[in-house]
């Protein structure tokens, strides 16, 4: 089979690789229908994270089950499935509390930008889609593998609920999905902080009630002007830079919450957060816990998170997908074998 | 009138002071029935915080209204009232969201360890107790002024609810009240971390299901042994030292929450918290938001937080109250004029 292998900064190649095989009785092998490139894949592509040796890459996928191990009972050969970017058994003490991102048996994928993929803990990771979904639904199902679950996680951990006011920092695929999540969870005022006309338009379609183009203190002032002068109840930080985190803390009201799904950069100003009673929570999304509900919303046509994909390429052109995202020519690239 | 004045480290005096007067139409003057000494008052007594000039001290009280300003409508002369340690108008945009600790019109007290006290924003700060409460209820009503609301806040911001597992770090008055709060909020496993037999006994009476005497990694291991090996859903940090915070983070499960009411000391290990999906929230308690419910629980005899007081002295002996708490001869001292 063929798949993407990162060799170093700026160097992702489409290569001939050994077919994956069942290694444990809880494994499944799936044939990929669609995969994509994640913002976090770019850390190695941009040289931010090292690449010690050539490594298969990718962690977002949907596909059809080809083979299952002897202990797999919930998915079967021929099922169309989607799984989150983190592997979970969905039975451990943490999974039972919904903390599937931190499953006691979590492990990395071997590289999902490939024609075939071994899924460890198949029953606990995969969710089967009834029948064979219409091709038009594939992007939205694929988006559940990471960005939609991640935007949803930001909203959940920040306590978004009916009647809350929400500001979203970051207008990439995750930020746009966070807007969609906030709308689904009942927020009334949803402020998307964005400077790009195309992303602003999609944010509005996803449910943003207001757009704020300013950043820094001017951005926080604009958010306060829309929230009775106090700041948003919930701020969803979907970037992962120091500036974005500072922006998020500046935009949240006293007693409110910041949901973090951007990667951590530096420590938090704890004394300020304490006196302001601001909560901070975040991390990798609990995909398996969220997948059934979000898949239902997609299948019923309530949400269409696949609209964040603005580039589609054959899997064989995976190198160009990385380049397009690196050069910001695309928000997010979908790949089909 | 007479009241406590701190002159410097180790030097609290009972002095003749001018009677307070109404300064704004929203003020009330109350005659103190009981007051007490807070752990945070000891920061100045111990020289941790400076005392630039002799300053009236204290922020916990209950008493009878003597006089009200022209715009005070909800409490009236003769009412027995209790107020929280933070002043709130209970009408601003933050108060309307329950964030009364961060009221847009918050301000400090002039010193509540005194015979008479001016209460700014009287309607938004004070809650009237129906009739004149039985003398036996005074300690529990007084406890609502700070420690019970603070323990409750720790539990609320950490998300304590029915069926949760909770560990409480700190067995002072706030820690003990946090145990009581966790029990009222429906926690099933409530682990009090305490080395003192008398406090362990009171923690058990307040609802602790388990006592852990170990600290550090041994303490965290003991908590994990009581929580399916993963740590507690919610950890309530009621001390405010670096060691206590480290203990709290070590005791919480991945995906769980730390409620902080101990004062911040240093920054948080954000990267570790992120990958573990651990939330952190805390600060000064939203007393006015919690008071009506907690007062109802006290008046119905459901909770008896006043049991944290283990020393009662005349207000004139306030210096001895400070010394007893400083020397750990008392958990918390109640003072009666």
Image: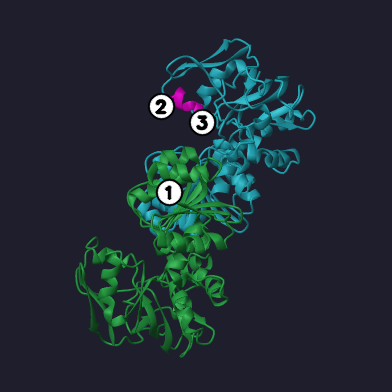
Chain colours: A cyan, B green
- For disc 1, the marked residue is B248
In the picture, measured across the screen, residue B250 lies left or right of residue A59, that is left
Magenta-drawn segment: A40-47
* Residue A46 covered by magenta stretch: yes
Q: Name the element at disc 1.
A: helix
In this view, B72 is above or below A317: below
In this view, B294 is above or below A178: below
Real-space CA distance between mark 1 and mark 2, rounded to the nearest whole angstrom: 33 Å
Which label sits in the foreground, 1 or 2?
1
Near-viewer residue (B48 or A176)? B48
- Residue at figure coordinates x 33%, y 74% from the top left: B58
Q: Name the element at disc 2.
A: loop
In this view, B64 is above or below B264: below
Q: Where in the figure is residue A120, as x and y percent of width and height?
A: 62, 24
Q: Where in the figure is residue A153, as x and y percent of width and height?
A: 57, 43
Q: Where in the figure is residue A279, as x and y percent of width and height?
A: 47, 53
In the picture, measured across the screen, residue B226 lies left or right of residue A301, that is left
- For disc 3, the marked residue is A39
Q: Earlier in the sequence, mark 2 or mark 3?
A: 3
Q: Which mark is residue A48?
A: 2
Q: Are marks 3 and 1 in contact (CB under 8 Å)?
A: no
């Amino acid at each position: 089979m063929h798949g993407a292998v990162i060799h170093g900064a700026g160097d992702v190649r489409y290569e001939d690789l050994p077919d994956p095989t069942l290694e444990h009785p809880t494994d499944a092998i799936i044939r990929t229908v669609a995969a994509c490139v994640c913002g976090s894949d770019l850390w190695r592509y941009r040289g931010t994270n090292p690449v010690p040796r050539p490594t298969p890459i990718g962690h977002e996928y949907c596909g059809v089950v080809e083979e299952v191990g002897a202990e797999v009972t919930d998915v079967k050969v021929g099922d169309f499935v989607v799984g989150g970017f983190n592997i979970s058994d969905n039975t451990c003490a943490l999974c039972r509390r919904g903390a599937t991102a931190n499953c006691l048996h979590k492990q990395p994928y071997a590289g999902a930008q490939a024609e075939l993929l071994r899924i460890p803990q198949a029953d606990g990771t995969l969710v089967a889609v009834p029948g064979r979904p219409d091709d038009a639904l594939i992007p939205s199902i694929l988006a559940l593998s990471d960005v939609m679950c991640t935007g949803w996680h930001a909203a959940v951990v920040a306590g978004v609920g009916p009647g809350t006011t929400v500001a979203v920092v970051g207008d990439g695929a995750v930020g746009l999905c966070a807007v969609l999540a906030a709308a689904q969870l009942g927020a009334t005022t949803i402020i998307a902080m964005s400077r790009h006309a195309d992303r602003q338009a999609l944010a509005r379609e996803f449910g943003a009630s207001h757009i704020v183009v300013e950043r820094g203190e001017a951005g926080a002032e604009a958010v306060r002007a829309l929230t009775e002068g106090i700041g948003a109840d919930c701020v969803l930080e979907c970037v992962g830079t120091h500036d974005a985190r500072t922006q998020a803390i500046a935009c949240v009201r006293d007693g409110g919450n910041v949901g973090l799904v951007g990667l951590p950069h530096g420590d938090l100003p704890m004394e300020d957060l304490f006196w302001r009673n601001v909560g901070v929570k975040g991390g990798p999304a609990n995909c398996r816990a969220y997948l059934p509900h979000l898949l239902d919303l997609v299948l019923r046509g309530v949400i269409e998170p696949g609209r964040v994909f603005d580039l589609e390429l054959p899997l064989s052109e995976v190198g160009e997908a990385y380049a397009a995202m690196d050069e910001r020519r695309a928000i997010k690239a979908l790949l089909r074998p």
